[in-house]
Amino acid sequence: MSSFLDRILGPRISIDERSKHSLRYGTPGFLLLAARVLLLVSVFLPYWHMELQAPQYPDGLHMTAYMNSLTGDVAEIDGLNHYIGMRSLYEAAELERTVGVFIMILFVVMLELAAYIHTRWAALLVAPVVFFPVVFLVDLHLWMRHFGLNLDPEAPLSNAVKPFVPTALGKGGIGQFVTIATPGVGLILAAVASVVLVAALFFHRRAYLPLVKQQRLASGTPNGC
Amino acid sequence: MKDKRTWFRFLPATAAAFTLCGATAASNAQSMRDVETVAKERGLTNADLIAAAKTYLPSGQKDEYLMFASGGHAGQIFVVGLPSMRLLRSIAVFTPEPWQGWGFGVGNEILEEGFPNGKANLWGDTHHPALSETNGDYDGEFVFINDKINARVAVIDLRDWETKQIVKNPLTLSDHGGTFVTPNTEYIIEGGQYAVPWGSDYVPISKYKEEYKGSVTLWKFDRKRGRIDKDQSFAIELPPYWQDLSDAGKLASDGYFFMNSLNTELATGGIQDKKPPFEAGASRNATDFLHIIDWKKAEQVYKAGKTQEIKGFPVIMLQTALDEGLLHVTPEPRSPHGVDVAPKGDFIVVSGKLDPHVTIYSMEKIKKAIASKTFSGNDEFGVPILDFDSVVEARIEVGLGPLHTQFGPDGYAYTSLYLDSAVARWTMGGPYGSGTPEPDWTLVHKTPVHYNVGHIAVAEGDTVAPDGKYLVALNKWSVDRFVQTGPLLPQNLQLIDISEDGTNAPVIYDMAMGVGEPHYAQIVKADKLNSWATYPEVGWDPHVQNIKPMAPKKGMERVQRNEDGSVDIYMTAIRSHFNPEHVNLKQGDTVRWHITNTERALDATHGFAVPMYNITASLEPGETVTIEFVADTPGTFPFYCSEFCSALHLEMMGYLMVEPE
């Protein structure tokens, strides 16, 4: 059992060795830490903005999505959306908003663990976090698509407005409204974290792959990980 | 769907293009030559162009000042922006007003508070608005107004600009001398005018001197509750002299207030019996009496219980007032209109219509005269008369028919001249003397106005810190100023630029006021107000300025038939529907119709109007109202939103069906 764990954790580095090559061994750990910080900070920041511009709203209508909440003029936008038969935005991504923060905590724990694992298994822990911003946007797009294509046919303006897919990023339009969707600082931080994590994996591989190979040769187990 | 990357690349370019377009458009179209062309075509002089430039507000720009003007016998308050002189809105007070849904199901209980002896009186004659003050300066929280015809005072909350309370004076039926506030709005002063027996009971006019009463009422204001506290209010009996306008002292005169009087002759008219009419009888004496009342002392006398209950209201009787030294009078030019306290509280300016002077009294001298009992005698009611020469500081001849005085920040004072149709600018002396280049106590300039000016209002011109800048002459006649609108002509409110010294004080705008006759107005810096743009929360009851616990909420709409047979309707309104849309009642049902406007958007007001039942309400975003009525008329009644709210506004309706018995 312990040998299984050892195989996953990979070669350990002595304190002497670490201090001799502090840059080599420190870099992946530091980058993983940086990614953790970025993700943690992002939880408190907006992930996504949508602005609706129309003549009768000189300041526009604004909606902001956080990891766990939807804020801004949501009630007003819902009120307008009812004309075209769109469901309340509060009904969108309920599960995602409920578990979002826990997922982020899980991500942080995974990255914490990844820092202790010196084999390719670390990549398995890091990969979901790397893809997270993309998954976020895809999820957002799917919700928009789902809401936009499933309009209530009994709605007041259903004759005038055909089902449509609101834009998840960039400029769109519906009726007299111009919609502008932009990523929030939180999402940008998460994206930066993804880049940092890819770099972390690169330096991780550079630091530990030679050691893993050495260990494999020494133990003579060709199938070792 | 557009490629998002393309769009991101385009954004800065679009922004730049937009800016460029804007710049070119501006530089293309307009040059001073174009201005000259337009001016020539329209026959405008340079002075006209300057006046236009000083007053014109491009779309979207906002006024610097708000003028709260009484509405005269319209019974409302009118709010005008300065310098644009645009009528921004009216505030319904004593008169039902359908646009604001005032008195057609909503606000009825407040209007009813003011019904004299419970008898419906559905109009008012508003004269003198008073903005609430802190340390003698407007604080923008409340505005009060009197109703001269029935002696009532109303309280308007300037968070939502709605009337919150109307109190009926139990002692008298006319209160031209209201409303004026003490420097911290401790009291709202309501002076009676035409003397009547207490409570307006029947007494033959032959007993005028004995039974007809003058009075002044001090309404205690409870700022926290935003209401007049009737239980802490009291009145003072005065001789039946037709007390008129008043003004509260401040700073040097803090603790006092001043009132004019018209009829110290005790004339009782009788033109039909060939007796002198009031206009002659009440103007016989060369002087009337300026009343000087120590309200802080009066408050102590009231608190000590030295009052008499009259018509259920505590009154400090005239004899008590004299015994306690609360009341002094001093001669003033006859038939006076305004009594106006200077910014530092040190001078009191009075003008009598039939005397071309303004008379300036010194508070210091008044106090001295009171202390040393420098009396020239007592009037026939025993009121001590302060010797005129001992209390007067200056007299200035300003012109014919001087009425009201307001103050600038720099030592200038302004007096309206009714007969001259002009506004006089004159200099004050004493501590104000150094503010003006001209010598003290002299007439500097007269600006002609059109025509027959009554009150004038200077920006914050009756506070401890006048702003000057603008003066509005509230002219009674407009004669030839506007295109003919039939034989009833609008009033003419003229804006005068008083920002420069000396003889330069031109009229720069004429505003036709065709909805009422403003008497007095106060002009407050707009940023002193903290108005709500929408009600703070959905389900707001403006009457208590809090959430109504049983306000209808989304998802809770219903028609509820109670055990006692009454019906509660819980309805919500949002663009573009009411819920419920079908309301079934039985003839004779007592109905409480609760409606919440659940909107949060600025300006998303809904109306609620029911035919045949004389119901119309204005529901501003967040507001909840309750309308009570008896469904006495059977039939089918389409109710609808009466405020154009949305593209599907016409569809925002429902059916009230009242089944016959």
Image: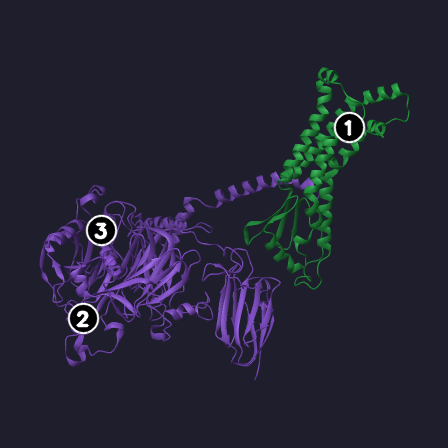
Chain colours: A green, B purple
Q: Is disc 2 placed on a helix, strand or loop?
A: helix
Q: Position of residue B256 (x, y in %)?
A: 22, 55
Classify mark 3: residues with Cα within 10 Å, few (<14), some (14-19) or many (20+).
many
Q: Are the two marked residues, 2 and 1, in contact with CB atoms closer than 8 angstroms?
A: no
Given this view, does label 2 or label 1 mark the residue nearer the observer?
A: 1
Q: Amino acid at mark 1?
A: Ile
Q: Secondary structure at mark 3?
A: helix
In the rendered image, the residue lying farthest to the bottom is B661
> Considering only vertical position in the picture, is A58 above or below B206?
above
Q: Position of residue B19 (x, y in %)?
A: 54, 41
Few, some or many C-alpha atoms within 10 Å of disc 2 (few <14, some 14-19, many ≥20)? few
**Residue B624 location, x and y as percent?**
51, 63
Kindly identify which residue carries mark 1.
A117
Numbered circle sitting on residue B253: 3
Q: Which residue is mark 2?
A: B279
Q: In this rendering, do the residues under marks 1 and 3 share a single chain? A: no
